[in-house]
Amino acid sequence: MKVMITITIYLMLCIPAFAGSTTTNMTVNLTGNSYCTLNVPTSIDLGTYTAQPMGASIPVSFDYECGWSGTTAAVNIGTSNGTYNTLRLGNIGSSYLIGWACKPGNTDCVYSYNLTSFGAGSYTITGTASPQTLTYYVRFNGCATTVTSAPGSGVCEAGVYNGAIDTKITF
Amino acid sequence: MVKSFIKNIVIMLCLLLCRNAIAGTVNGTTTTTTTIAQYCTATIGSGATLSLAYSGDDSSTSTYVDIQCSNGTPWVISVDGGTHALGELRRAYVNSSGDRYVPYRLYSDVNGSNELQITTNNTINGIGVATAATASQKVYLYMKVLHSDINPSVLFGVGYYTDTITVNLFF
C-alpha cells in the first residue's frame, strides 16, 4: 500500500517598503604629472654642397606637447661628447661633417655659444598641454679630421654623409 | 523583524587634481643625409707672380697653382696666351719709348720638355687627391725666357715688363 503525501511550500518574498537615506562620501584622487611628448621627423636631407662653404640654414620642425599649462621644459638639439654641442652629421673615413643647430627664430644660423645656437645650452618651452610645433635651424659648416675638431679645419671628401640629430626635452 | 535599508549612496567626487613636478626626459633622433659633391677649387700659390730678371742668358722661374679637388675627380688646367701674345709666343710688355715686348714660354715641367702653347697643347691634366688628410696638390708652371726668342733687331731695352695670364681649372 502506498501513501502519497503532498507538501506544498510557499515562499513569500517580502520587499519592505521602508523609506530612508544615508550619505557616504567617496574621494577620487587623480594625479596630473608633468609630461612631454616628442615627435621628431624620421629623416631630413640637408642638401648637396660643393667644397665646404657654410651651407644655408635649413629649418627643421618637430611636434611636442608638454603639460601642464605654465610649466617649463628645456629643449636640447644636437650631439657631441656629452655636451650637446655641435651636430655630427656623419663621416667618410676621417672626414667628419660638422654643423650646428640654432634656436627658434635664428633663421641665419650662426654659431654663438649658448646664445643663438644651442651649444651646450637649451631653449625653454612653456607647456600648454596642447600639441605644439617648434622649428629650429640646422647649418652645415664644414669638415674636420676628428669629430672634436673645429668645423672647417679639414677637407670634406666627396660622398654621402649619414648622421643624426638628437632632440631632447627635459621637464 | 526584518529590517532592510535601501541605501542611496550619493557619491561626492572630490576631484583633486594634483600637478606633480615629476622630472623626466623625452628623446628623439632624426637621421640626416648630407651630400658633398665632387668639387675643385684653385688658388694661386705664394709665388703668384712669375718674376724673372733677364740679363741676356736663358732664364727661368716658376710658380704653382694650389688645386683642391675631390679625391678621384679628373681636372684640367688650361693657360691662355696672356694679353700680348704673338702667334704661339707669349710676351711681356712695357711702354717705354714705344711698345716693347719680351717673349717668354711656359712649361709644365721643370725640364722644359712640355711647353704650354696658346692654341694647342695648353692644358695640364690630373686627378684630384683631396681627402681629409691631403688637402691640395700643387701644379707648377715654369717660365723661361730664351735668348733665341729675342729678336736682335728689336731694341727691347731695360724696363719692367708685365703680362697677365689666365689659368682655368675644369673638372
Image: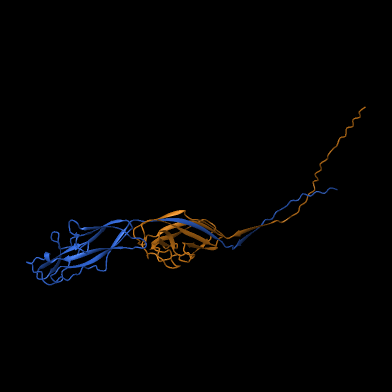
The chain letter corresponding to blue is B
The one of B166 and B122 positioned closer to us in this rendering: B122
The one of B95 and B10 positioned closer to us in this rendering: B95
Q: Is B127 left or right of B87, judged from the image as shown? A: right
The residue sitting at 48% across, 59% down in the picture is: A166
- x, y percentage for residue B123? 22, 57
User: What is chain A's hue in the picture?
Assistant: orange
Placement of B100 over or under B75, stated as above or below: below
The residue sitting at 50% across, 60% down in the picture is: A168
| Image quadrant in which you'd find residue A30 | bottom right
Is residue A65 visible in the rendered image? The answer is yes
The one of A167 and B89 positioned closer to us in this rendering: B89
| Image quadrant in which you'd find residue B146 | bottom left
Q: Is B33 left or right of B136, judged from the image as shown? A: right
Is residue B163 visible in the rendered image? The answer is no
The residue sitting at 48% across, 57% down in the picture is: B29
The quarter of the rendered structure image containing the C terminus of chain B is bottom left
- x, y percentage for residue B102? 13, 66
